[in-house]
Amino acid sequence: MKDAKKKASGFIAEFKAFALQGNVLDMAVGVVIGGAFKAIVTSLVDNVITPAIGLLMGGVNFTDLSYTVNEAEIKYGAFIQSIIDFFIIALSIFVFIKVFTKLSRKRKEAEEAPAEAPKKADDVVLLEEIRDLLKEKAKDETLV
């Protein structure tokens, strides 16, 4: 009995370590947001895109497209609509990743770019020129 409890607590500890990893939590958030995003895309396809395509095709409503064989009804219109959903979701994810990658690259380049040296004040520049001239003059006098 103790051996079973020990195995169970080891399993629970292992699962807890797995579930609390950052990647798993990020993935869970992504799944939840993806589910909400799918609802938006499905609404867009059902209420905007599909009727527009139907108008272009002479008033065809995809959801009503079906083929009946004996008692079985094959609803291929719903399948066509699911394909449209998939392509819109895939395109949206592609565009999102592309924009995110571009922004991340720009931010990384900005962080890696060397900072410009602060501009020296005019009086400091003038004093440095005077110093350099005096050094050169002293060098010329020692040579003579």
Image (spheres, rainbow, N blue to C red):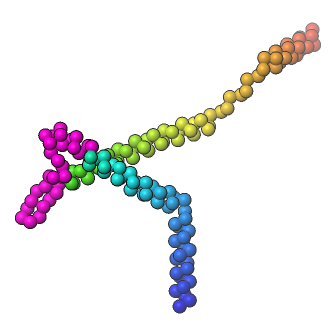
Q: Nearer the viewer, residue 68 or 36?
A: 36
Report which quarter residue 139 is drawn in: top right
Q: Is the residue 91 above or below the residue 34 in the image?
A: above
Q: Residue at x 56, y 83 (%)?
A: 6
Q: Would residue 43 appear left or right of 138 to someone viewing this image?
A: left
Q: How many marks?
A: 0
Q: Position of residue 100 (x, y in %)?
A: 48, 42
Report if residue 143 is visible in the image: no
Report which quarter residue 107 is drawn in: top right
Q: Which residues are magenta?
A: 48-77
Report if residue 7 is visible in the image: yes
Q: Would residue 30 appear left or right of 115 to someone viewing this image?
A: left
Q: Residue at x 39, y 47 (%)?
A: 93
Residue lying farthest to the bottom in this orientation:
1
Q: Position of residue 43 (x, y in %)?
A: 31, 49
Q: Position of residue 66 (x, y in %)?
A: 13, 55
Q: Is the residue 19 above or below the residue 116 in the image?
A: below
Q: Would residue 10 appear left or right of 87 to someone viewing this image?
A: right
Q: Residue at x 56, y 74 (%)?
A: 13
Q: Nearer the viewer, residue 13 or 144?
A: 13
Q: Residue at x 12, y 61 (%)?
A: 73
Q: Is the residue 100 above or below the residue 8 in the image?
A: above
Q: Nearer the viewer, residue 134 or 86?
A: 86
In reply to whether residue 45 is colored magenta, the answer given is no
